[in-house]
Structures are given as structure tokens and as C-alpha cells.
Image: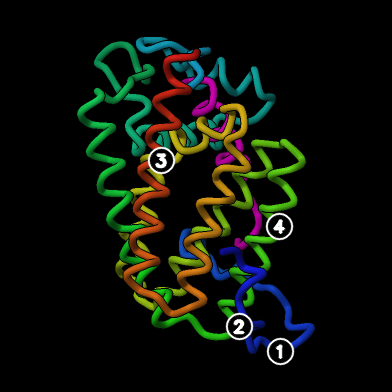
Amino acid sequence: MSLDDLPANSAPPGAGIVVRRVDRAAGAAGKITRAEELRLQLADEIVRGALPPGAALDETDIARRFNVSRTPVREALRQLAASGLIETRAHRGAVVARPTLERLTGMFEAMAELEAICAGLAAERMTPLERHQLEAVHEELRVLSHAGNPDRFHEVNERFHNTIYAGSQNTYIAEMTLATRVRVQPFRRAQFRNLGRLAKSHGEHDRVVVAIMRGDKAGAELAMRAHIELVRDEYELYAVSV
């Protein structure tokens, strides 16, 4: 069953779509900083293997390469360190790291459980407007899944998950979930480069959204947990291909 089989929700027609963000202050909602752009670019190169484990990350070199000051570079490296993609070594500065398989598996297991909790709570607590917002983002992802743009799909995918976190109506759990996602994000992003992954991801989302719209807590939890487990499997397929 798809969203087309569900009754229309009660969101007022013409309501503005404002996705609540739990990862940024309200004033910065929807705006990506230069540090975030750098973090995404460097994270992508690390996960793809363009920057191999042990490679040095010099602030001055990176600033020159991207034609920016060292301030956003420093912040991007701090964020990468928080995600475990880089580490600081004595006399060497920042270098590329790679989590062990055991560590990465543990991160994805935590991510699956936290996201499942958010989806289950959202099924119970989402307001009509929030459900309307979720449907709108889901539809945007459907269009993008046919366009074949993994970078844009990733960006909107973040909004999709943020909408569910916010819909849980539990700020503490939403913050915990986001903090974990920040650590796993580069690996989640990489799997979108797998052939056919965008369409499959949208199909997995569809099962989550249908359950939420029905108010099916157990179904939403099950669908979201399965989705994140498949994300992990897709990343592993990607990792052996690069």
C-alpha cells in the first residue's frame, strides 16, 4: 500500500510548509554554512577513499584549496572529528581515520533504535500540519528519486528525518537521535551513490510514512528500524566498491 491509498489529511489547504529543524537554531533554518559545505565535501572524499586513512588534513592547504579562510575549515574539521572520520595525532595534526567494522555496526544499531523511537512517537503525536509537512517532503523525495541526483536527495532526506524527529514531540530524544546521526551521516550519505538506491530509499520511506499517517506506532517503529538496517547494508555494498 502507498500513500495514495490513505485518506487525505486535515491540513489546511495552502498551509506553508515549514519543516522544524532540531539541529540548528531557528534563525539558521534551511541555510547551510560554509563550514557545513566543507564538512560534507571532505566527508564524501573520506568515505569514497579519495582521502585514505592516515592522510593528513592541513588547515592551510584545505583553506587554499577551497578558497576560504581557516575559520570554516577549523569548524569543519571539528565536526569531522566529532563524527569519528578524523582524529588528532601528536605532531601530525588532523588525519583521516576510519571506524572499525564493530564501531560502525554499533553506530548503525543505535541509529536504528533511536530513529524507530522517533517514528513510533510521531505516529502517536504528530499534528495534522506536521503530517502534511511529512507528506510534502516525501513527495519531493519521490520526484528526486527519478531525477537521479544523490546530493540533492541527501539534502531533502535530512529534512524528511528531521520532520519525524520534530514530530516525536520529545526534544530530548530528537537531540539524541540527531547527535547520533551526525556521527553516522557521512556513511548514510555515501550509500545514495549505489545504483537504484534513491528509488529503494523512497520505497522504504513510504512504509514509514504510511504507518505514521495511520497512527500505527508499532508499524512505524518496525518500518524505520528496517530502513536504517538497509541503509547500513547499502553502505557496506558501497564501501567494497570504492
Label 1 sits on residue: 12
Instruction: Please state which of the two labelled residues, at mark 3 or mark 2, is closer to the viewer.
Output: 3
Range drawn in magenta: 28-46
Q: Which mark is residue 140?
A: 4
Q: Residues within 10 Å of mark 3 (few under 14, many from 20)?
A: some
Residue 220: quarter of image: bottom left
Secondary structure of the residue carrying numbered label 2? helix
Residue at mark 1 to residue at mark 2: CA–CA distance = 8 Å
Q: Amino acid at mark 1?
A: Pro
> Quick one: 135 or 64, which is closer to the camera?
135
Q: Is residue 33 left or right of residue 149?
A: left
Report the coloring of the rendering.
rainbow
From the top left corner, tell me how far across and down residue 90 is, in percent.
Answer: 24, 15
Q: Are marks 1 and 2 in contact (CB under 8 Å)?
A: yes
In the image, residue 177 sits, relative to residue 234, either above or below, namely below
Main secondary structure of the magenta stretch: helix
Q: Are marks 4 and 2 in contact (CB under 8 Å)?
A: no
Pick whichever of labels 3 and 4 is earlier in the sequence. Answer: 4
Q: Which mark is residue 171?
A: none
Label 2 sits on residue: 129
Label 3 sits on residue: 230
